[in-house]
Image (cartoon, rainbow, N blue to C red):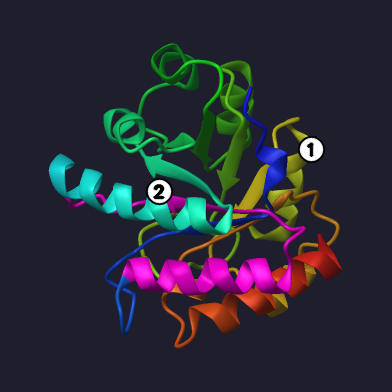
């Protein structure tokens, strides 16, 4: 079975935030910086572009597959199991209202990662029972890049979630280098970010700073 412990930084795409050369180039810059700065800390990328058609998402997924393979990063696709299989992604990421992990596993087989979005302890417990490999939990803080994500649970809420499951839990929502230090005792396996990297002037510099904070604090 795929192993989520191979990464500690989960980059979630939003091409509307990317500057300069676009989202693929921003991802390449981030992953190149990660390999140079902290080759011992794994990175995964979630392709999350919900407004694209299946054809458009597949085409972008093929580009991301090439970039992730070049730099040794894992690739998941948000929600679209068909696209994940077609572009040979390493796994799928399931929103809270999507397939159950057990249903996804039947379609994906045993080797691919299944991540889930969780917003409560019960979500985490359900994900573990259903056979997910990891969970993204939050928002921990008010998100930097999107609104309407619900009330922030705070570090105490994150710690409660981590205690409730054996799954690796990644903190999402408003994550910054400074706040990563506050997560030290939470039990989180890593952090998931959108705007902190893809909305940054330099995705490479932002990634370097986050990886150093992960090394020091998680």
Residue drawn at (55%, 79%) of the image = 204
Q: Dot 2 surroundings within 10 Å: few (below 14), some, or many (20 or more)?
A: many
Residue drawn at (35%, 51%) of the image = 48
Q: Tell me the CA gap for discs 2 and 1.
A: 34 Å
The percent coordinates of residue 216 (x first, y second) are: 85, 70
Q: Residue furthest front?
A: 70
Residue drawn at (81%, 66%) of the image = 215
Is 31 covered by the magenta stretch?
Answer: yes
Q: Which residue is mark 2?
A: 65
* Vertical arrangement, residue 213 with respect to residue 200, above or below: above
The front one of 121 and 218 is 218
Q: Secondary structure at mark 1?
A: helix
The front one of 47 and 103 is 47
Which label sits in the foreground, 2 or 1?
2
The percent coordinates of residue 1 (x first, y second) are: 64, 22
**Magenta stretch bounds:** 23-52
* Vertical arrangement, residue 104 with respect to residue 23, above or below: above
The front one of 88 and 172 is 88
Residue 125 placement, left or right of 109: right
Q: Residue furthest top?
A: 106
Q: Is residue 176 visible?
A: no
The front one of 94 and 154 is 94
Residue drawn at (70%, 33%) of the image = 167
- Identify the image quadrant of residue 192: bottom right
- Identify the image quadrant of residue 182: bottom right
Q: Is residue 187 visible?
A: yes
Give the mark, 2 or 1, whose residue is nearer the N terminus: 2
- Identify the image quadrant of residue 49: bottom left
The percent coordinates of residue 134 (x first, y second) are: 62, 36
Mark number, residue 163:
1
Is 162 covered by the magenta stretch?
Answer: no
């Amino acid at each position: 079975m795929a192993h989520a412990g191979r990464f500690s930084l989960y980059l979630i795409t939003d091409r509307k935030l990317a500057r300069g050369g676009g989202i693929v180039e921003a991802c390449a810059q981030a992953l190149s910086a990660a390999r140079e700065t902290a080759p011992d800390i794994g990175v995964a990328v979630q392709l999350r572009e919900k407004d694209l058609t299946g054809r458009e998402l597949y085409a972008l997924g093929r580009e991301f597959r090439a970039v992730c393979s070049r730099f040794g990063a894992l690739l998941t696709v948000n929600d679209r199991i068909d696209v994940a299989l077609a572009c040979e992604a390493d796994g799928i990421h399931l929103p809270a209202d999507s397939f159950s992990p057990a249903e996804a596993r039947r379609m994906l087989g045993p080797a691919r990662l299944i991540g889930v979005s969780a917003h409560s302890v019960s979500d985490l417990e359900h994900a573990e029972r259903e056979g997910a490999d990891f969970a993204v939990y939050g928002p921990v803080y008010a998100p930097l890049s999107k609104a309407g994500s619900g009330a922030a649970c705070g570090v105490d809420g994150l710690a409660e979630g981590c205690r409730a499951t054996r799954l690796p839990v990644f903190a999402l929502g408003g994550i910054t280098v400074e706040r990563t230090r506050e997560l030290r005792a939470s039990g989180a396996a890593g952090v998931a970010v959108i705007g902190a990297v893809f909305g940054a002037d330099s995705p490479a510099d932002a990634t370097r700073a986050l990886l150093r904070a992960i090394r020091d604090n998680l």
